[in-house]
Amino acid sequence: MAEIILDSGNFDEEVLNSSVPVLVDFWAEWCGPCKMLGPVISSVAEKYEGKLKVCKLNVDDNMELAEQYFISSIPAVKFFKNGEVVNESIGFVPQPKLEAIIEDLI
């Protein structure tokens, strides 16, 4: 399953009302570290399919959601469980570190 592309129209349904934990990657096209993190996010999406929902939110296209979740630096990865942010990371994060957070979440 590929990452789900989020916007204001599907954010509540896909993230806040999800029955499984959700990883949201807040990113932008022009962001170099975001491009480095992209393959890591894709790999995590494949590895945890069925246990974790992996989503991407372009902050340039969804500024109101970025502001709502206090995104001031990207890439920012927020982890949601039962509609609440339970963990986060800022900047490029190696896959083992992301997986450690995920393992605690699921």
Image (cartoon, helix red, strand yellow):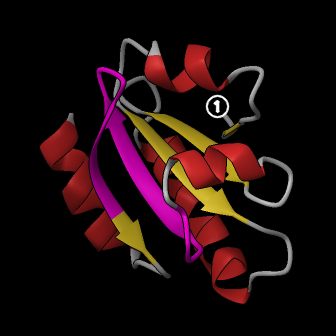
Q: Is residue 42 visible?
A: no
Front residue of 85 and 94: 85
Quarter of the figure with the N terminus: top right
Q: Position of residue 95 (x, y in %)?
A: 39, 70
Disc tally is: 1
Left of 71 or right of it: where is 81? left
Residue at screen point 41% across, 78% down: 93
Front residue of 8 and 5: 8
Q: Position of residue 30 (x, y in %)?
A: 85, 80
Q: Which residue is mark 1?
A: 1
Q: Position of residue 15 (x, y in %)?
A: 51, 26
- Position of residue 27 relative to residue 80, above or below, is below
- Position of residue 27 relative to residue 48, above or below, is below
Residue at screen point 63% across, 67% down: 39
Left of 44 or right of it: where is 89? left
The region drawn magenta spans 71-88
Quarter of the figure with the C terminus: top left
| Residue found farthest to the bottom | 32
The secondary structure that dominates the magenta segment is strand
Q: Position of residue 63 (x, y in %)?
A: 75, 52
Magenta includes 78?
yes
Magenta includes 37?
no
- Position of residue 32 relative to residue 4, above or below, is below
| Residue found farthest to the left | 104
Query: Dot 1 lies on which element?
Result: loop
- Position of residue 77 relative to residue 14, above or below, is below
The amino acid sitting under disc 1 is Met
Task: Using a 10 Å C-alpha cutoff, classify the residue at mark 1 as few (fewer than 14 neighbours), some (14 to 19) or many (20 or more).
Answer: few
User: Which of the 4 quarters of the picture holds residue 36?
Assistant: bottom right
